[in-house]
Amino acid sequence: MALSRRARDRQIDDWPGFVDALSTLLLVFTFLIAVFMLGQFFIGREMAGKEDVLQRLARQLSELSDLLALERSAKVEGEQRILSLSATLQRAEAERERLAGLAANAGQSEQQLGTLSQQLADEKTVAQRALEQVSLLNQQISALRQQLQALEGALEQAEGREKDAQTRIAELGSRLNVALAQRVQELTRYRSDFFGRLRNVLGTRPDVRIVGDRFVFQSEIFFGSGEAVLAATGLGELDKLAELLKNLEREIPPDLAWIARIDGHTDKRPLSGAGQFKDNWELSAARAIAVVRYLVEKGVSPHRVVAAGFGEFAPIDFGDTPEALARNRRLELKITER
């Protein structure tokens, strides 16, 4: 009795420090979450602005490309017209020379020669105008090239800013992963403490054992063969489990998402189908639900417990002996993240 009293006094003395440590961890995690949310907000705004700039630049680039294509087409047409006018001019000059020869040889009238000269002058005027249009087109093409160079420079700057933003996002993601890992470690520590208490409460019963990260209860503790109604002999063990889960709810911070999962398992022998349950799947799920409902009735929060039925599809012993089949008829308790 004296040893027990000293142990309780020591636990009472350690409790304020434990609460302070938990409060500090909660404040640090809240601060990290706030920093992460602010980072996400500013990065989202910056990325949205960059996307708008890139879309606007893309539209301007498309418009300039269309305009450049039109100008190139006009330039080609002008060059074709110049070639046509040059050919016409050459023909006119040849015709003039021919007519001059004819006039010298045959004494053509000066009126026809004047008409041909006027036609030649008109053709020269058209050719001069075409040359002026070609020069204007060349100037416009040069201006468009300068605008394209400016747009390429702006795009390079935008890409550089986007890379910086991606780097910052990666850094924030890494920090978040570290924070999540810390929360997982914290939940693991609580789970280890809980399993230690549960082991002390249940004692050294041969039909209760630990397999990996879960407590395993043989189905015969709580249910009869092929039934999903809790037997009175197992209610005392469930009462102990309910008290431990309620204590765990009070100890774990409310922002740490966790659940106690009750998994129902059966052996591989099929049911006849003539009873209440068609197959082992329904039987295992009904047993897990019965345990969860009892824990909730005893005060465990329904938000912290969940039932799952696995039937015969997750055995821990693949043998066919009665002992192997009995090991597979079980209920498992696992503390895990939500």
Image: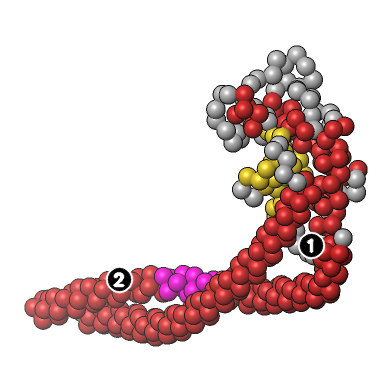
Residue drawn at (35%, 70%), measured in percent from left and top?
77
From this viewpoint, is residue 316 visible?
A: yes
Q: Which amino acid, by three-letter code, is at mark 1?
A: Ile
Label 2 crowding class (10 Å Cα cut-off): few <14, some 14-19, many 20+? Answer: few
Whole-Å distance between the Cαs marked 1 and 2? 85 Å
Res 98 → quadrant: bottom left
Q: Residue at x 46, y 80 (%)?
A: 156
Marking on residue 99: none
Q: Where is residue 295 in the image (x, y as percent from the top left)?
A: 85, 44
Q: Give the range drawn in magenta.
A: 56-70
User: Which residue is labeled 2 in the image?
Assistant: 80
Q: Which amino acid does label 2 sit on?
A: Gln
Question: Which image quarter is the N terminus in?
Answer: bottom right
Res. 252 mark: 1
| Residue 107 in sight from this viewpoint | no
116 lies left or right of 63: left
